[in-house]
Amino acid sequence: MEKRINPLDYLPELYQNCENSFTERFLTIFTDIYSQFEREIDASSKIYDPELCPDEFIEWLGKWISVENMQLFPDDKKRELLLLTPWLSKHRGTISGMKKLLKLYCGTDVFIVEYYHVKRYFSSCKELERIYNGGRFTVWIICPPIKNRVEALSVIVSSQIPANITAKIKILSNITELNNYCYLGINSVLSGMEQGILDGKSAMDYVYLGRDKQ
């Protein structure tokens, strides 16, 4: 329990024995007001802590420390974005920084393909060269299927990449084909084999890459 301040303790000795006097009761009005101020000041540090601040201060705190594009993130991810901001500032413009930021936004891992990752395969696979064209100052950001957030994703990426780099964003489709942005385990799976019966009555089933058909 919080100890109440006795205003007489701050007065000359002449007033020390005036307990329950008018003087004490009168001064208590002001000490109660100041005590409330002191409690608010003591607790003010929580406002600047992303883990402890009330929800209504999240947006304000983000503006105070200049978090970019915070308004694009869902409300349930803004607090985590604030906590991640110091780390992101140190890794701005890097692959690791971009991956972590986009994972927070998309809710899952993304692929970031640089030119040197795929250039070595161009001579043996012309289709790969067709897909990943753009030159050595281009990166491809491959994201899982997301709805109605492509423009926001583009804004977030543009604010993070170095000035001399061009980023191409590709949203994976749930239906894809080999040699055209086919990522195993993301938009394609492998399954076990099923024996086909050519009896004129059966139809061949769909083929899944990655896991047994559910």
Image (tube, rainbow, N blue to C red):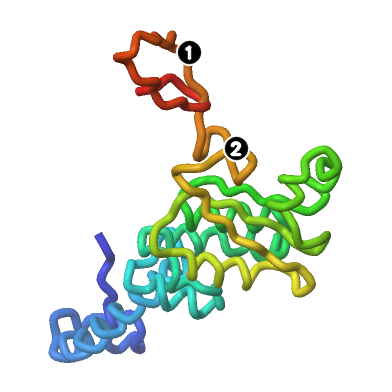
Mark number, residue 2: none
**Residue 120 location in percent, x, y?**
85, 43
Q: Secondary structure at mark 2?
A: loop
**Residue 5 location in percent, x, y?**
29, 75
Which residue is rendered at x = 83% and y = 48% of the image?
A: 119
Mark number, residue 178: 2
Which residue is rendered at x = 40% and y = 70% of the image?
A: 58
Closer-to-camera residue (47/96): 96
In the rendered image, the vertical position of residue 93 relative to residue 199, given as above or below: below
In the rendered image, the vertical position of residue 128 relative to residue 63, given as above or below: above
Amino acid identity at mark 2: Leu
Amino acid identity at mark 1: Met
Q: Secondary structure at mark 1?
A: loop
Closer-to-camera residue (7/107): 107
In-image side of 45 versus 76 (left or right): right
**Residue 194 location in percent, x, y?**
43, 12
In-image side of 99 versus 148 (left or right): right
Question: Which quadrant of the figure contains the N terminus?
Answer: bottom left
Which residue is rendered at x = 67% and y = 64% of the image?
A: 167
Within 10 angstroms of label 1, few (less than 14), some, or many (20 or more) residues? few
Q: Which residue is mark 1?
A: 193
Distance from the alpha carbon under mark 2 to that under mark 1: 19 Å
In-image side of 64 versus 25 (left or right): right
**Residue 107 location in percent, x, y?**
46, 50
